[in-house]
Amino acid sequence: MIEPLDRSRRDSSLFQLTSKQLRDFIDPNHPLIRIDEQLDFAKLVGPLEKYSRPEFGRPAIHPEVMVRALLICSLYNIASFRRLCSAISENIAYRWFCFLTIDDPVFDHSSISHFIDRIGRDGFGAVFDGLNDELPRMGLLSPEMYVDSSLVKANVNSHDLSPSGMTIEEFKEQAVQVNGLFVIAETTVDDNRVEHEEARYFQRPDGRLPLSPVDTDARWRTSRPGKPSGLYYQENVMDDLGGFIVSRGVTHASEGEWKAVPDLLERLPLPPISLAGVPATASASCGNGWRNRTSRRTSPFIPGRTPAWWPAASFSITATT
């Protein structure tokens, strides 16, 4: 079990001969105070215990402090970890929220990067799920949901990738379809005249969309009409009316955006009463996923209100009695 943070140290008096605390200099209506009082951070970081090895090396920064710092980074849209550490150093509310006294040095930005690398995707997934469990309890989630997708460029080099060089008929004869990809075996000769057989992966059955051998999950897609294609992933999210991301998933960029909707609906922390999205996410499967999640029929409607960050919705569905 992760040891809880020492609240008495954070809330002690600033100096001798005074009863003033760091919190006394923070606006009592500051959102970080409300979050600190209502969000169960100990429960939130509990799943991260398996990533901690206190018996090895020097004492690590408490995982709750790291999660609190990342929450500040997200809430206040701070662009980098360097800027985040500077902001924590300069802002009294940020210091107090991260359990740093007025005299404590702020951790280095590299500590945040190491923390992220250590807990990985599974650790962040556990924190995300825990946060989604806490938000409804705090009354901060709206059942009005919005779905959208965006492309994320893959961290691979596509300049050295080339088509197969075969005709379409030759490629179809030699290629083997594996997990939706088309694979051919090619023989290469190195500088020592030693032959090596390697597999080449292609997105299409004509051999003209080669994929990176180090990341075959990245798919060719253009970010917008008229722009050159690149290797991307597709990030799919559902937000509530307040902008909280309540469900998230990553799919191949070559797949239709609507295919991600049923899985996103299954991961929601509370039953939705409405769902709005752009045309690419609308399909019969979206309606089927909605019915499975809510056990209700659906009907089209025009949303009465949309968040400021949301574009004009082109489709919407809502529960009917």
Image: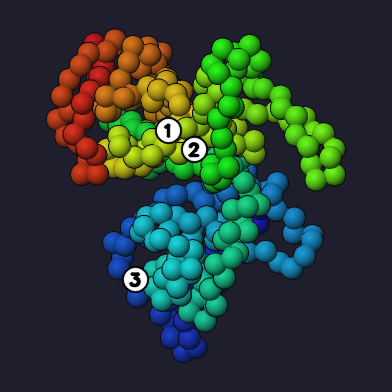
Which amino acid type is marked by label 2?
Leu
Determine which of the numbered discs, if any, sits on residue 231 in the image: 2
* Left/right of residue 29 with respect to residue 220 in the rendered view: left
Res 281 quadrant in image:
top left
Instruction: Say which of marks 3 and 1 sits in front.
Output: 1
What residue is shown at x 55% (from left), y 30% (from top)? 163
Residue to which mark 1 is pinned: 221
Q: Earlier in the sequence, mark 3 or mark 1?
A: 3
Distance from Cα at disc 3 to Cα at disc 2:
47 Å
Which amino acid type is marked by label 1?
Arg
- Label 1 residue SS: strand
Residue to which mark 3 is pinned: 26
Distance from Cα at disc 2 to Cα at disc 1:
6 Å
What residue is shown at x 21% (from left), y 30% (from top)? 313
In the rendering, at what x and y percent does residue 1 appear? Answer: 68, 49
Closer to us: 212 or 130: 212
* Left/right of residue 132 with respect to residue 56 in the rendered view: left
Closer to us: 282 or 119: 282
* Left/right of residue 147 with respect to residue 206 in the rendered view: left
- Label 2 residue SS: strand
Closer to us: 215 or 119: 215
